[in-house]
Image (spheres, grey):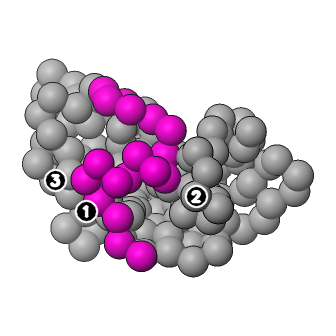
Amino acid sequence: MHIQGEDIKRLIPQRAPFMMVDEFESGDDSHAVTRLTITKDNYFMLTDGTMATTGLIEHMAQSCSALAGSRSDGSAAPVGMIAEVKHFLCSRRPEAEETLQTEVSFNMTFGQMTLAHCTCTSKGETIAEVDLKIFMQ
């Protein structure tokens, strides 16, 4: 499954200016790959032309949302909230016009809580990783 453009709105509940996924490259029940090309007008851009680390976390959380949305039965995209951020590592902040590729793995789901691991790369370099606990409504 490859989804991009306006169709990405089927998978995630976020809307502009907070949409942080613009392509769903592939996925199965527990794994997905997403992309985001960072624009200069991205909400999380800093004055030095780089994206804030909070933007990286939001992008990875929305990548989790896209995976959850791809597993839904075609109904509205599920709404999730970050319940916990653990083991966040960031080697550098990406710049405008970079494309982020993020791999998401759902490790465990218990009730409405899902544990996920995300790895974000750009230009073949791992720039951020995080473990998220996500509460899905």
Query: If the image is split into quadrants, where does the C terminus sit?
Result: top right
Between 36 and 14, the residue placed more toward the observer is 14
Residue furthest to the right: 111
Amino acid at the residue labelled 2: Gly
Q: Is residue 45 visible?
A: yes
Between 120 and 7, the residue placed more toward the observer is 7
Q: Is residue 60 visible?
A: no
Residue depth check, mark 1 versus mark 2: number of the one nearer the observer: 2
Q: Residue at x 87, y 56 (%)?
A: 110
Amino acid at the residue labelled 3: Glu
Question: Residue 96's image quarter?
Answer: top left
The residue carrying pointer 2 sits among few (fewer than 14), some (14 to 19) or many (20 or more) residues within 10 Å by Cα, namely few
Identify the magenta region.
1-18
Amino acid at the residue labelled 1: Ser
Q: Report the Cα–Cα distance between label 2 and label 3.
A: 31 Å
Question: Which numbered disc flags the more N-terminal residue, 2 or 3?
Answer: 2
In the rendering, which numbered label is found on residue 98?
Answer: 3
Q: Are marks 1 and 3 in contact (CB under 8 Å)?
A: yes
Residue hosting label 2: 74
Q: Are marks 1 and 2 in contact (CB under 8 Å)?
A: no
User: In the displayed structure, does residue 101 sit left or right of residue 128?
Assistant: left
Residue depth check, mark 2 versus mark 3: number of the one nearer the observer: 2
In the rendering, which numbered label is found on residue 137?
Answer: none
Residue hosting label 1: 122
